[in-house]
Amino acid sequence: MRKPIIAGNWKMNNGPKETAEFLSTFKASYKNKNSAEVVLAPPFCSLAAAKEGTAGTEIRLSAQNVYYQDNGAYTGEISCRMLKELGVQYVIIGHSERRHVLGEINELINRKTLKVIAEDLIPILCVGEKLDEREAGITEKVVNLQLEKGVQNIPADKIGQIVIAYEPVWAIGTGKNASAKDAEDVSKLIRDILAGLYNRETADKVRILYGGSVKPENITEYMKCSNVDGALVGGASLKPDGFLKLLNY
């Protein structure tokens, strides 16, 4: 049985002081009645504060991005080895904002994914279509291409280590959210694509998250879907009380 994940992606929010305050408040009321895996992805500058604040808890840390080199003249980038020193276990890769705002292409995303796996970290590989692609009826084509390119050259014995996040771009930060049926249909598509690339047994091990305007008010309907194994949450994870409600869906 796949263990569910509730992951909070803070994006460019919550500096070190705010992170320490968040975790102090959060831990005072922390309950996890669903035994989900709890993951927080603060900005790079807040990872040290998050490591300190989560010490002795089951909360796991994720980075929001990474580079595929160990070191060198890559101004503004951060390596897997640096992240590991900060206690990071997960890395978000290919988020729509990295793809569509910052211009990351499938080949770069694949190189990052391969590096993260090689360093024994867990990638959260994001895929999803834009509004015009959805309206053009090419969601399946877009997701298929992003997924195939993203997992290229990853051996079958490692693919179960990956987490896939389906994030329809039109639903991220817009207040619009895909229906539970939409989330289930695309999550099943993702699992079927992986089964075709590898095999059904391998595909059934992969955890698939839904992300896109997930809130305490709607998370339960997504978690009832048979192919949705959790949520990658943005704005609703920024406050301790909101994140607690998400965990206790």
Image (cartoon, rainbow, N blue to C red):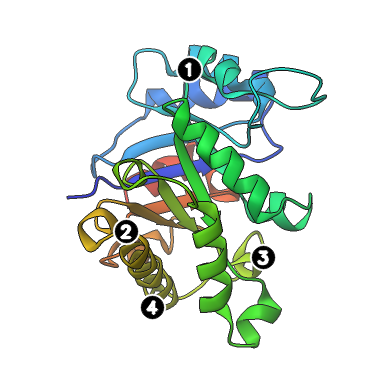
Q: Is residue 104 above or below residue 157?
A: below
- Residue ID for mark 1: 87
| Cα–Cα gap, marks 3 and 4 | 19 Å
Front: mark 2 or 1: 2
Label pair 3/4, CB-CB below 8 angstroms:
no
Q: Report the side of 196 relative to 136 (left or right).
A: left
Identify the disc placed on residue 76: none
What is the spatial separation of the Cα atoms under label 1 and label 4, in whole angstroms? 36 Å
Q: Are marks 2 and 4 in contact (CB under 8 Å)?
A: no
Q: Please identify, in this view, whether the residue under mark 3 or under mark 1 is nearer the observer.
A: 1
Looking at marks 3 and 4 on the same chain, the residue that comes earlier in the sequence is marked by 3
Amino acid type, residue under disc 4 in the picture: Lys
Amino acid type for the residue under numbered disc 3 = Thr
* Crowd class of label 3 (few under 14; some 14 to 19; many from 20; radius 10 Å): few
Instruction: Using the rendered view, name the quadrant where residue 244 is placed.
Output: top left
Per the model, the C-alpha gap separating discs 3 and 2 is 35 Å
Expressed as whole percent of the image width and height from the top left, the position of residue 172 reads 62, 61
The secondary element bearing badge 2 is classed as: loop
Residue 44 in the image, given as x and y percentages of width and height: 66, 25
**Residue contact at pointers 3 and 2, CB within 8 angstroms:** no
Secondary element at tag 4: helix
Mark 1 surroundings: few (<14), some (14-19) or many (≥20) residues within 10 A: some
* Residue at 33 percent of width and 70 percent of height: 192
Position in image of residue 181 (x %, y %): 38, 78
Whichever of labels 1 and 4 marks the residue nearer the N terminus, that label is 1
- Front disc: 3 or 4: 4
- Name the residue beneath numbered marker 2: 198
Task: Pick out the residue farthest to the left.
Answer: 1
Report the residue marked by disc 4: 181
Residue 152 screen position, x and y as percent: 50, 52
